[in-house]
Structure formats: C-alpha cells, structure tokens
Image (tube, rainbow, N blue to C red):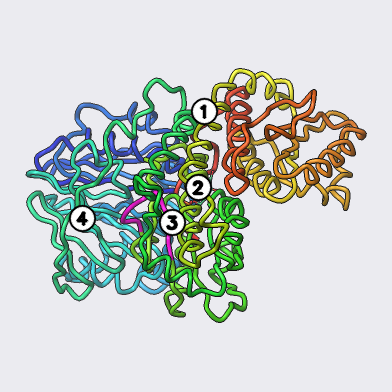
C-alpha cells in the first residue's frame, strides 16, 4: 500500500528515489511519481502502472539532490496521472507525497479552499493546497505545515518540499508508517527500511504526531508545538542480499523455500543449547495471568492464529479466541475478566490490527505483538513483542510468515505450559519436533515438479475450487484457499469437511476441483475421506494432501508426519506450492497480484 521515499543532500536524488520506489513495489500500487529539484530547477514526473513505466518517462534532465517519490494504491479517485503523487499546491510551489487517508478532506475543501481548482480527486491534493493557502495567507512554511497538521484528521505519512527552498524536506506522521534514514551528507525518509538499505543501515523512528525537519546534515524531531524530541538512531539488521530475488523467478518461491531455514532460526533464537525456552519471562507471566487469550489479526495472520489455537489451548490451558481485526476495532465483543491480546502481523503495520491495539491500550489490556518487523508500529505500541526472524517477506502472498507465526507461538505456548508445570508441555520436545518440521518441509519442497504437474491437471481452467478438512486441517484449508484466491484469482473456499453437506455441496458439479486435507487421527481421516467420497460421487475432481501414516493408494501428496501441535505447518506447505503453480501456470504476476498491497496501512 502507498510507499514514500525522499532524500535531501549530496546524492543523485533521481537514482535514489527510483531505486527506493522499486524496493517499495512489493507493497502494492497502481501509479507512481517523483519530484526532483536542483536549486530552483525542478521536475515532476508521474505515471500510471509499474515503476518501469515511470522510469521510461524519466529523461537525463530529471536530476537534482532533493526529491520525493511515491507509489500510490488508489483509495480516493482512480489510478490516473492526475491522482498520482506527488501533488502540488495551487501555485505549484509546494509538492507533497502522502500515505494514508485524510478523513476530513471534504470539510477542509469546503472550509478553507473555496475557489481552488483541483486536478484530481485525492485527499492528498487538498492537503497540499491547504498548506499553500496558509503560506499565501502569510504564514511561514513551517507554521503553515503545523497549522495544516492541526486541522487534518486521519492517517498520514507526509513528505513536503518547498520548491523555493529545496534544502529541507518537511515530514510528519500519524498512524501510517514512516522512517528516517541517516547518511553522511544526506538524509532520507521512507515508508520502510527496505527502500533505503542500499544507502544506509542507520535509521531513526518517527512516532505518531511528530514532525521531522530534514536537511542534508540534520533530522530534527519535534512535536506539533515545535518542542524538540531527543531520538536516538538504530542500526537495521537487514542485509541488502536479504531483499534480492537471487536466481528465483519470484520472491514467493524463494520465501517458500526459506521456510526450513526460518524454522531453524527460530529454534536457535527461542531455545538455548539444552532446549530450554528462551522467551521473555515477563511475556510468559502475562500469559499465565490471563484467563483468555484473544488473537487479533487479518488475512493470513488471522489464519495462522487458527493454526496455533489448538496447540496454545492444550499447552497453556487457556481458552483462545480469534478475532478479525477490522471487525474488533469497532465492535469489541464482551471480554473475559483477564484478557491478553496477541496481535499477529507479519508487517506490524496493518491498520486494522493497530486499531484493535489502540482500543486494547485504552482499556489497559496487556498485549503481545508477534511480528516479522522490529520497530514496526504494532511492535512499538504493544506491551511485548516476539519477533519472527523470518527475514523480509516481499511477495504479497504471505508464506514464511505464516509458518513462522505458528512456530513462534509454539515456543510461547511451551514456555507458558512449562511455567504452569503442565506435563504435556514438559514432555513436548519442541526443538526436536521443529527440526522434524524443517525436514518435512524440505521433503515437500523436493516434490515441486510432481505438485506442479498435479496443479496443471486440476486447476488450469477452473474458475472455482474448494479445500476441505476437519479440525486443524480446516484451519489449514482456510489459509490454503486464501493463498489460491489471492494469486491465481480462482474463487476458492476453505470449508469444514463435515459442513459441506449442509448447503455448499450444491455447488459441486462435474469437474469442480476439491482438495481434501487429511492429517490428525484415523477417525478424523475416515470422516474426511467420507466427505471426499460425497463430493467425488457428484463429479468433483479430487486431489488429496495426506499426512504420512494415513495415506491410501491413490492419494496425491503425502506429507511427512510431524507432531500434531505442529501439523498445520507441515500441511500448509503443499498448499502454498499449489497456489504458486496455479498462478504461474496462468501467466500471472505471482508476487504482485492485482488490487492487493503487502502492508495494508489503511482501515
Ligand atoms: C497474505 O497472503 C495476505 N497478503 C494478507 O492477508 C496479509 O496476511 C494481511 O493483510 C495481514 O498482514 P499482516 O500480517 O502484515 O498484518
């Protein structure tokens, strides 16, 4: 979802902005633009479509040492050049990029901008006209920016340049992600570290309702009253090689392949050499004190919550309830007496999840964010954080973050269970079992060609499909169907196998693809096989994914047996590959599915 990059100082701004925007492509966008200035000479270039389309429009005369760039994911107004950022004020003097949603933009237009001619339909254009108007009215640039910020409601990350003085970039943030990158003789601003890591590994956080006055030699953080705030910098762990695709055709395949390594990284991070859990005792205590765990998340992270539910309940003896973040942010149900909230979020920036966290903080509920991104908003604002250590996940379709979330929660569950003296937790050799999971993943990954062939036969022409399973397999079916939908555009439902006959089986017709997931016990397997027979009898084209030990002749994909608490990890891997090949075989852009953004930073 929208990305911002900006730079001021002794560097080639065009190059930095374009490289940065390319690194932000993974967030999802439908148009892009840059503004570059060299003293009083400046250029504004925008384009609908990919960064490559923008690049094609940039001539050698687009050069300078100050600049701001933007990738836009349309919210207000279609993806057109007029709506693409950067936007300019009425006289063209001020240039602004924005990520977020200005909620009161129509009121602002009515109240302050009568007679202003706007080129597009965006809320952002209104913000830059407002700043320009205040300067016309006699305020200094800084005062005008501050006054606009005091009026604007909603979420925003802003980077503003005054074309009459391009030695400064004015930055402000509320709810939308934004970071400062510090260099030698230049400074940068960006939506995430990945876009700046080629230039610097030294970063500084900006908190909500803070401004930064950025020049080539300084980054001054203030509140909206202008009071200076001391803020240290930190060195990002990120490595440039982490964000490359290497020899892979798509990031998604690379990230699927990285999962055994991620499992081993989690073992070395959250267990010591003797297998003792290495989880912050304060987090363990907080969970121990809770009478109910609430997992709040969106999309794949929500599904990962389900995939961890049984294990968490069995090991901690605490009921686990799941909530869709976008619902709970505005419609919080009745909670238990001592709730503990766990926010699951790969990016740590999902606005819907953040809305729940804001509410939880207001209510004084202890919270834990489980995220892949250190220093992310959800991590900063929760009481505690557990990091996934999965390395950057760039494909829009989340894969390694899902399996890392389940594995990370397994360490938490075991640590809490042990602290409670629960025999099942003490006996659960997580380090060993997770090593077996890593091996199981490797075994599935070695069957890629076979899986690709089966996918071609099953899904090459279909418009719809079903995943079915019981218990944990149902939870995996939810994630498997989301993955298939988002990158292949095949309409797919993940169903509880036994529930199909209560209505949805009417959709099964000759050739409807149904993928049956079978793990767990003989009894569960027998019932799911019964449901598979029911759909096959009605003409469904069936593919089975079965855990070793439960397989029968004719089954399609057999997954190595792992500990039942971790079976959702083993079972999800073939479904990730099914989605990948279905998308690839349809000739789609696997990593950047239409309409989707990697980090969904608007509610
Ligand atoms: C996953 O494949 C999706 N792209 C999406 O559902 C994602 O999981 C969701 O938007 C939540 O993101 P988060 O984990 O960064 O909070």
Q: Which residue is mark 3?
A: 370
Residue 429: assigned label: 2
Disc 3 to disc 2, C-alpha distance:
22 Å
Q: Does the beta carbon of the residue at mark 3 sit less than 8 Å from ligand 1?
A: no
**Mark closest to the chain's N terminus, 1 or 2:** 2
Q: Which residue is mark 4?
A: 204
Q: Which mark is residue 442?
A: 1
Nearest the eye: 248 or 209? 248
| Residues at discs 4 and 1 in contact (Cβ within 8 Å) | no
Give how far across and how far down residue 266 sits, in percent: 40, 45
Circle nearer the N terminus (4, 1): 4
What residue is rendered at 51% in x and 56% in y?
426
- Tell me residue 544's x, y (percent): 74, 31
Write the start and end of the magenta stretch as one range: 368-376
Q: Quick one: label 3 or label 4, which is nearer the N terminus?
A: 4
Q: Are marks 3 and 2 in contact (CB under 8 Å)?
A: no
Q: CA distance from mark 1 to mark 2?
A: 20 Å
Residue 364 image-quadrant placement: bottom left
Q: Is residue 240 above or below residue 584?
A: below
């Amino acid at each position: 979802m929208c990305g911002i990059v900006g730079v001021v100082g002794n560097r080639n701004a065009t190059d930095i902005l374009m490289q940065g925007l390319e690194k932000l492509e993974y967030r999802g966008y439908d148009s892009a633009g840059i503004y570059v200035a060299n003293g009083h000479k400046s250029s504004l270039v925008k384009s609908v479509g990919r960064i490559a389309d923008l690049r094609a429009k940039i001539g050698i005369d687009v050069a300078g040492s100050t600049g701001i760039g933007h990738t836009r994911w349309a919210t207000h107004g279609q993806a057109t050049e007029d709506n693409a950022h950067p936007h300019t004020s009425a006289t063209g003097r001020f240039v602004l990029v924005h990520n977020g949603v200005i909620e009161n933009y129509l009121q602002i237009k009515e109240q302050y901008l009568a007679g202003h001619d706007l080129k597009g339909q965006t809320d952002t254009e209104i913000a830059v006209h407002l700043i320009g108007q205040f300067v016309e009215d006699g305020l200094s640039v800084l005062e005008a920016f501050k006054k606009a910020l005091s009026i604007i409601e909603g979420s925003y990350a802003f980077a503003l340049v005054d074309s009459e003085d391009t030695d400064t970039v004015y930055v402000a943030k509320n709810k939308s992600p934004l970071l400062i990158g510090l260099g030698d003789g230049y400074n940068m601003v960006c939506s995430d570290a990945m876009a700046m890591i080629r230039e610097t590994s030294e970063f500084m956080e900006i908190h909500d309702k803070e401004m930064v006055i950025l020049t080539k030699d300084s980054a001054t953080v203030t509140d909206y009253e202008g009071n200076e705030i001391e803020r240290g910098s930190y060195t990002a762990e990120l490595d440039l090689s982490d964000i490359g695709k290497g020899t892979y055709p798509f990031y998604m395949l690379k990230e699927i392949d990285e999962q055994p390594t991620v499992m081993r990284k989690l073992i070395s991070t959250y267990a010591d050499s003797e297998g003792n859990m290495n989880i912050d005792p304060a987090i363990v205590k907080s969970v121990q004190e809770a009478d109910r765990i609430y997992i709040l998340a969106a999309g794949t992270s929500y599904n990962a919550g389900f995939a961890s539910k049984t294990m968490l309940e069995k090991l901690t003896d605490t009921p686990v309830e799941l909530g869709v973040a976008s619902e709970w942010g505005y419609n919080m149900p009745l909670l238990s007496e001592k709730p503990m909230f766990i926010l699951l979020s790969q990016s740590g920036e999902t606005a819907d999840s953040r809305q729940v966290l804001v509410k939880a903080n207001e209510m004084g509920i202890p919270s834990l964010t489980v995220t892949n991104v250190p220093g992310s908003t959800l991590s900063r604002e929760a009481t505690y954080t557990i990091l996934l250590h999965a390395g950057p996940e760039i494909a829009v379709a989340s894969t390694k973050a899902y399996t890392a979330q389940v594995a990370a929660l397994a360490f938490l569950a075991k640590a809490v269970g042990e602290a409670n003296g629960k025999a099942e937790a003490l006996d659960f050799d997580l380090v060993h079992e997770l090593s077996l999971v890593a091996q199981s993943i490797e075994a599935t990954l070695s069957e890629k060609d076979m899986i690709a062939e089966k996918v071609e036969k099953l899904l090459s022409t279909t418009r719809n499909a079903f995943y079915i399973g019981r218990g944990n397999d149902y939870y995996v079916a939810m994630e498997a169907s989301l993955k298939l939908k988002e990158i292949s555009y095949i309409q797919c439902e993940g169903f509880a196998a036994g529930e199909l006959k209560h209505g949805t089986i009417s959709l099964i017709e000759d050739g409807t693809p149904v993928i049956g997931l079978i793990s767990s016990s003989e009894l569960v397997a027998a019932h799911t096989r019964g449901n598979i027979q029911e759909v096959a009898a009605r003409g469904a084209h069936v593919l089975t994914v079965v855990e070793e030990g439960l397989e029968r002749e004719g089954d399609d994909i057999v997954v190595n047996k792992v500990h039942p608490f971790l079976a959702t990890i083993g079972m999800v891997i073939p479904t990730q590959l099914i989605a990948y090949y279905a998308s690839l075989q349809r000739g789609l852009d696997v990593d950047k599915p239409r309409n989707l953004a990697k980090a969904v930073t608007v509610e």
